[in-house]
Amino acid sequence: MARPQKYKVSDVVEALQKAHGLKTGAAELLGASFTTVDKFCSRHAECQAVVDHWKKRRKDRAEYKLDEAIERGES
């Protein structure tokens, strides 16, 4: 018999949004382990989509900041 899930997908999605897609932050908000959130993301596309969204956003922001620094002549 399968163990009932302690967290709902909507709970994990909300925690991931609040933690800007960081699984460690979401785990802290939920009172769960990183492994629990990581497994949740591998099983539920909605959760992984939040992680992917924030990862892309961070990458875009980092590239933008790098371009700004280059334009200012910083090495």
Image (cartoon, grey):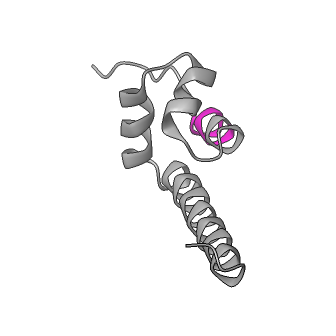
At a point 36% along the width and 29% down the height, the residue shown is 35
In the picture, residue 41 is in which quadrant? top left
Seen from the viewer's position, the closer of residues 17 and 22 is 22
Q: Nearer the viewer, residue 9 or 53?
A: 53
What is the x, y in percent for residue 28?
57, 22
Q: Nearer the viewer, residue 68 or 58?
A: 68
Quadrant hosting residue 15:
top right
- Residue 23 among those drawn in magenta: no
User: Residue placed farthest to the bottom in the image?
Assistant: 71
Q: Position of residue 33 (x, y in %)?
A: 43, 21
| Image coordinates for residue 27, horizontal then vertical, percent | 52, 26
Q: Is residue 57 above or below residue 74?
A: above
Q: How many marks?
A: 0
Whether residue 9 is in magenta: the answer is: yes
Q: Residue at x 55, y 53 (%)?
A: 46
First to last magenta residue range: 8-14
- Picture coordinates of residue 29, whole percent (x, y): 63, 23
Q: Is residue 75 above or below residue 50?
A: below
Screen quadrant of the C terminus: bottom right
Q: Is residue 54 left or right of residue 41?
A: right
The answer to whether 6 appears left or right of 64 in the picture is left
